[in-house]
Image (spheres, grey):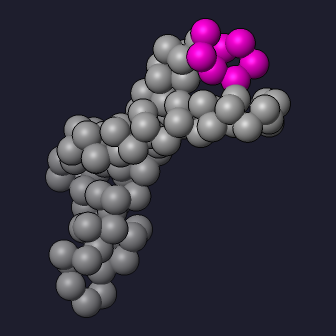
Amino acid sequence: GGGGGGEPFSLHVVTSIVTGVVATTVAAPFDTIKSRVMAGGPGTNAASAVAALVRREGPAALLAGWWPAYCRLAPHAILTFPLLEQMRALAGLGNF
């Protein structure tokens, strides 16, 4: 036990890990494109950066930097969401 609504604490940790994976995977292409646009100089826009990236490096390059981004995000998610659920349980609040 230990979570709100009789959910085990481990469930909150596992769902936080999954949340980190999903959030990192969704955000990584946008972070990569933003970095390429910023490094490209004047006249570089998102569409041209994506086209050049995919043409030169392939679609997998959109996920460049995924692991460092996950290592930054995961600890935050693993601490935040289980802590939130524990605080809700202590306050006597139900599920969302």
Q: Position of residue 83 (x, y in %)?
A: 53, 36
Which residue is at 21% across, 44% downward?
68
Front-lying residue, 11 or 17: 11
Q: In the figure, is residue 91 to the left or right of 69?
A: right
Q: Is residue 6 magenta?
A: yes
Q: Which quadrant holds residue 39?
A: bottom left
Q: Which quadrant holds residue 37?
A: bottom left
Q: Is residue 12 magenta?
A: no
Q: Can residue 83 be seen here?
A: yes
Q: In the figure, is residue 5 to the left or right of 10?
A: right
For the C terminus, the quadrant is top right
Q: Can residue 58 be seen here?
A: no
Residue furthest to the bottom in view is 42
Front-lying residue, 17 or 80: 80
Front-lying residue, 74 or 3: 3
Query: Please, is residue 24 above or below residue 30 in the view?
Result: above
Q: Position of residue 22 (x, y in %)?
A: 47, 35
Which residue is at 80% across, 35% downward?
93
Give the residues in magenta.
Answer: 1-7
Which residue is at 30% across, 80% downward?
44
For the N terminus, the quadrant is top right
Q: Which quadrant holds residue 24?
A: top left
